[in-house]
Amino acid sequence: MNIDDRLRMVPGFSLFRRSSSVVANPTTQGVSLRGVGSTGASRTLVLRDGIPLNDPFGGWVYWTRVSADQLDRIEVSRGASTSVFGDRAMSGVVALFSREPERHRLQASYEAGNRDTHNLSAGYSNLWRNFAATFQSRAFTTDGYYIISEADRGPIDTKANLRFAGGDAKLDWLRGRDRLSFQFDALAEERDNGTSLQYNSTSLGMIGASYSREWNRDTMSAYAYHMRQEFRASFSSIAADRTSERLTLLQTVPSEATGGAAMVRHNGSRWRGVFGGDFQRVEGYSKERVFPSGSRVGGGDLLQHGVFGQADFSAGPAKLFVGARHHFTGQDSRFFSPSAGITAGRGPWRARGSVYRSFRAPTLNELYRQFRVGNAVTLANPDLKPEALFGAEVGIDYVGESSRAGVTFYRNELTDLITNVTLSATPNLITRQRQNASAALARGVEIDVRRRWRSWQFDAGYLFADSRFSTGERLPQIPKHQGSAQLTFMGQNTIAAAGFRSNGPQFEDDLNSFLLPGFAVAHFSMRQRIASNVWAQVAIENLFDREYVVGQSPTALIGAPRLWRVGLRWDGRLR
């Protein structure tokens, strides 16, 4: 249904918990790749048309801001990309690219499914001589599902659900080699979090502008944006038998962010490069009403800025690249992030290797906001330091006409990793705090395979990730084994796909006390043309209705049951 569940087919792509964004609290939707990360903050940068989607206050991603129907493609770059992209790209970058505007192009769809699910989306674009306009919107509602298994469920438990409406608009001025764009997007969503007293809601808006100019071999581009939002949430204390709960905390978190970047690209016959600078200023406060009495406010502002450059040089069959960033993290500290690598190819084969140093500064959320999941409380920590990573990887790829395969071995040394450290644990209350762990080591291997024949395509991927603290415990929320496979048929009038993804066991906490068993779920989707521009579609998630654990609070939290939906879609030009 949402982009995050589609991206879970990429081994190594993970949110803080296994929950889908259809019902999960948005503060758990931070992205990590390759087993780097053990908290809700992203260690991967998510971009839409070059502008960050990561929440400036907490680093997580509101996946409901993006409609999959309006995207042209998604590119996932695994491995540190800090030299160019900065603070949030510690483990990689996920780049979303919208469709280019077309003359009188209309897309509209409606889907209905079980659990009273309704999904409505629409988009329109048009081109004139020097102008283009794109508009899109989406509304969604579902009654959701219980996140506590029937055996553990009590009178206080309700279905976790989601309701949201959002949209965006983009205006482009096109003249020769110049392009000036203005864009706006807004989102309003609300969720019930699985008990009578727990809920959250968010309202946000963003405006942005970008400009680019092309010469024969050079391109200059710049963008700027301003975003405002307010996040609201409630938390409760739950009796062990789940027969009663007590309101403990009401939070209101207003925040705003302003950012921008400017860069120059050169595409020469012997070398290519990009050089520029960027900045982001964030201000936010967690305003809390504590029950039965009391209040507190925590927050502040962070200003980050940096300069960067990256270039690659061709030398026969080999290509060398070097990059560097000098960055001010906003906490009276600076960070130098260099990278270097080499690729060499012959025929369909290519070998590659690289080394890099990257970093991530703590978010205002980690510094100042506490939260609660069931009877597990996580405290903020205003004394957090930036975390750092030194990594190396080597790999080999085969790229044929109808086949593609790649293997990558990587090793990442992490220092001052921010994680949720257990301070105390009783049957009624688990208390944790965000702290800088002494050190951790993440190493593993990725395998990706693609094979095409006629109208069929097979994709498979696997990740082995051994991520451990220096004391030997495994990093929480990171399984050792992840894999996926999908078979797709792409005909002129029919598109169908069936596949599965699997996760090995992982731990909920830093002490490795709460084990989350492994699981596998299957899916199926099909789209059939029934008229010139009209398609019928059906999709089923968790095809075999597998019950699996996504977290411990300490009561086991379960993932989505079988979800299905059917609908109609119009996609074509208006005549």
Image (cartoon, rainbow, N blue to C red):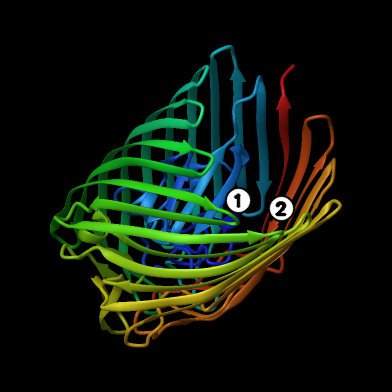
Pointer 1 local density, CA inside 10 Å: few below 14, some 14–19, many at least 20: some
Residue nearer the viewer, 228 or 244: 228
Task: Report the residue marked by disc 1.
Answer: 1
Horizontal and vertical percent position of residue 197 = 36, 59
Res. 539 mark = 2
Horizontal and vertical percent position of residue 123 = 60, 30
User: Is disc 2 placed on a helix, strand or loop?
Assistant: strand
Pointer 2 local density, CA inside 10 Å: few below 14, some 14–19, many at least 20: many
Asked if residue 489 is positioned above or below residue 118 in the image, the reply reads below
Q: Amino acid at mark 2?
A: Ala
Asked if residue 63 is positioned above or below residue 345 in the image, the reply reads above
Q: Amino acid at mark 1?
A: Met
Residue 547 appears left or right of 431: right
What residue is shown at x 83% (from left), y 45% (from top)?
494
Residue nearer the viewer, 427 or 158: 427
- Image quadrant of residue 205? top left
Chain-order first, disc 2 or disc 1: 1
Residue 404 appears left or right of 269: right
Circles 2, 1 touching at the beta carbon (< 8 Å): yes
Residue 518 appears left or right of 24: right
Q: Is residue 54 visible?
A: no
Residue at mark 2 to residue at mark 1: CA–CA distance? 9 Å
Q: Is residue 276 visible?
A: yes
- Image quadrant of residue 145? bottom right
What residue is shown at x 37% (from left), y 32% (from top)?
223
User: Is disc 1 placed on a helix, strand or loop?
Assistant: loop
